[in-house]
Image: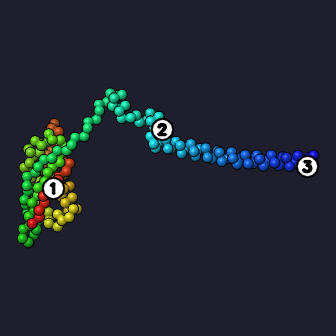
Amino acid sequence: MASAAAPAAEAAEGEAKKGGGKKKLLLIALPVILIGAGAGLWFTGILPGLLGMNPPPAQTAEGEGAPAAEAPRPPAFFDMPEIITNLNVPGRRPVFVKLRSKLEITRAEDSAAIQTAMPRLLDLFQTHLREMRPEELRGSAGTQRLREELVARANIAVAPPAGSNQPTPRITDVLFTEILVQ
């Protein structure tokens, strides 16, 4: 009888091992599934919303009494006078550049401030152009460098004097309507 009990005990022990393997698999798979589901909910924005971490923008503006953000204004443009000046060409016949441009400004109200600063703007533009060589204006890279330099100089020219309470006009871009090097 002892011999008959031994095979039954071995069979029960084998079943326990099989069940133990399923338990180990379950212990590993369950956290992986939960982490995957949590990550999916987090990156879709459902979990932060459920936890109140990022309320919808409409709720923030109306619910807390915060003022609604202003709609972005379309840019305004200011026509610059035509500039004709010579370029820096030592020892050769003179080379001239003709430039027509528009300034892109953030607010149309800044046109008066730009008109007031026009002598300074023209001076800064012309002095920069006179120092350039014709090779520096070739290609789109040269035009882009000229644009960046003119935007920086224009913002310097239209800045109000230090200590002034006037709002600073902001020039965001210089748009070329004509560049002729001859």
Whether residues under marks 1 and 2 lie with C-beta atoms below 8 angstroms apart, the answer is no
Q: Secondary structure at mark 3?
A: helix
> Could you classify mark 1 by the number of other residues whose Cα lies within 10 Å: few (under 14), some (14-19), or many (20 or more)?
some
Q: CA distance from mark 1 to mark 2?
A: 49 Å
Which one is earlier in the sequence, the residue at label 3 or at label 2? 3
User: Which amino acid type corresponds to the residue marked 2 in the rendered image?
Assistant: Leu
10 Å crowding of disc 2: few (<14), some (14-19), many (20+)? some
Colouring style:
rainbow
Residue toward you, 14 or 87: 14
Mark sitting earlier along the chain (1/2): 2
Name the foreground residue: 106 vs 86.
106
Q: Position of residue 84 (x, y in %)?
A: 7, 59
| Residue 182 rendering spot, x and y as whole percentages | 9, 66
Q: Earlier in the sequence, mark 3 or mark 1?
A: 3
**Residue type pointed to by label 1:** Phe
Helix, strand or loop at label 1? It is strand
Q: Amino acid at mark 3?
A: Ser
Check disc 1 and report the residue beneath it.
176
Residue that mark 2 sits on: 47
Q: CA distance from mark 3 to mark 1?
A: 102 Å
All told, the count of numbered labels is 3
Mark 3 lies on residue:
3
Q: Is residue 162 visible?
A: no
Q: Residue at x 54, y 45 (%)?
A: 36
Residue at position x 17%, y 67% in the image: 135
Left or right: 173 in relation to 62: left
